[in-house]
Amino acid sequence: MSVYDKLQALNITLPPAATPAATYVPYVQSGNMLFLSGHIARKDGQVWAAQFGRNIGTEEGKLAARAVAIDLLGTLHAATGDLNKIARIVKVMSLVNSTADFTEQHLVTNGCSELLGEVFGAKGVHARSAFGVAQVPLGACVEIELIAELA
């Protein structure tokens, strides 16, 4: 089953590549590696602003991280023209906007990791880091960047 068949089965429509909010590009290719800039969580077309431990919980956060994963897939598609060219998702790094006592950043980030696994199967299994940070640009609850290997 192609990546696009899996997306259709999951009822996911890929968005266009995100427009950078500052001075950077959405992705850079070096050899067969593709580095995607951080993408922030959005809900209903707006920044999903919140802070874990204050006004958003882990389960809702997983949905935010899943939404980021969908945006990352849109950028991957824009970069490659065909998601079936992805040999492997290599690494995901997640920045979780959280209070000092919130400790479930890894569980929030599962929302992204689980979707990548659903879409790419074994090629979606990746190394990962999840950090709690005092703030993310525009007050977003989650920012995630991704590294992929091209076939």
Image: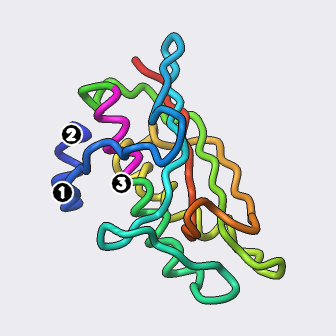
What kind of element bears circle 2?
A: loop
Where residue 11 sits in the image (x, y, percent)?
A: 18, 61
Of residue 69 and residue 75, the one placed in the foreground of this image is 75
Q: Earlier in the sequence, mark 3 or mark 2?
A: 2
Residue 77 shown in magenta: yes
Residue 127 lies, with reference to residue 79, above or below; the image says: below
Q: At label 3, which amino acid type do we have?
A: Ile
The amino acid at mark 1 is Ala
- The amino acid type of the residue labelled 2 equals Met
User: Residue under circle 2?
Assistant: 1
Which mark sits nearer the N-terminus, 1 or 2?
2
As drawn, is 141 to the left or to the right of 21?
A: right
Residue tagged 3: 70
Label 3 secondary element:
helix
Q: Badges 3 and 1: C-beta atoms under 8 Å apart?
A: no
- In x, y percent, where is residue 54? 67, 88
Residue lying furthest right: 100
* Residue span colored magenta: 71-79
Badges 1 and 2: C-beta atoms under 8 Å apart? yes
Asked if residue 89 is positioned above or below residue 105 in the image, the reply reads: above
Residue at left 43%, top 63%? Answer: 66
Q: Nearer the viewer, mark 1 or mark 2?
A: 1
Q: Which x, y percent locates residue 117?
A: 44, 50
Q: On residue 9, which mark appears?
A: 1
Q: Residue furthest top?
A: 31
Residue name at image x 52 percent, y 81 percent: 59
